[in-house]
Image: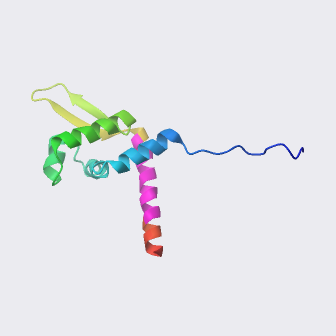
Amino acid sequence: MNNNEKLFSRKTAPQSSARMVEAIYGCKWSLTVYQLLSSGVNRPGEMVRNVEGLSTKVLNQCLKRNVEFGILDKVVFNELPPRVEYQVTEFGEKFLAILDQLEALQQEIDEKA
């Protein structure tokens, strides 16, 4: 082997997933929305009624971002009055599992401090 040959190239952080994690943690309501969905609360009006301080405008922004990332899926029912529900996608399940691991890691760090 030649001494001038490089065995490894510089490793960089994954850009898209890192941005997703940053955006989700940057939105103070996303984790609350996931908690609501896991509790069976999947309609926006119901979410606003169940969380003090959560406005419809902010919730809609949060839900839209999560749908764009592919974490949540918006289900529109063709009925009157109109009904919309949100559900976690298959990709979202994987993403939420990673967030759970980050939370467990943080708890471990907190216990050592």
Residue 11: % across, % down? 64, 45
Which residue is outermost to the top? Answer: 78
Q: What secondary structure is the magenta-colored segment mainly?
A: helix
Looking at the figure, which quarter contains the C terminus? Answer: bottom left
Instruction: Identify the residue shown where x is 42% and y is 42%.
Output: 20
Residue 103: horizontal and vertical position, in percent? 41, 60
Residue 69 x/y as whole percent: 39, 36
Q: How many marks?
A: 0
Asked which quadrant contains residue 85, the reply is top left
Q: Quadrant of the N terminus?
A: top right
Q: Specify whether residue 104 is in view.
A: yes
Furthest residue in direction right, as rendered:
1
Give me the residue at 48% from left, 74% from top. 112
Q: Is residue 103 left or right of residue 77?
A: right
Taking depth in this image into account, of 109 and 79 the one nearest to the observer is 109
Q: Give the magenta part as a residue range.
A: 92-106
| Closest to the observer, 88 or 66 | 66
Residue 71: in magenta span: no
Q: Position of residue 74 (x, y in %)?
A: 28, 33
Relative vertical location of residue 100 with respect to residue 55 in this rendering, above or below? below
79 and 8: which one is in front?
8
Q: Is residue 61 toward the left or the right of residue 13 in the image?
A: left
- In the image, taking residue 34 as reference, residue 102 lies left or right, namely right
Q: Can residue 43 be spotted in the picture? A: no
Identified at 48% across, 39% down, the residue is 16
Residue positioned 16% across, 45% down in the render? 55
Residue 99 among those drawn in magenta: yes
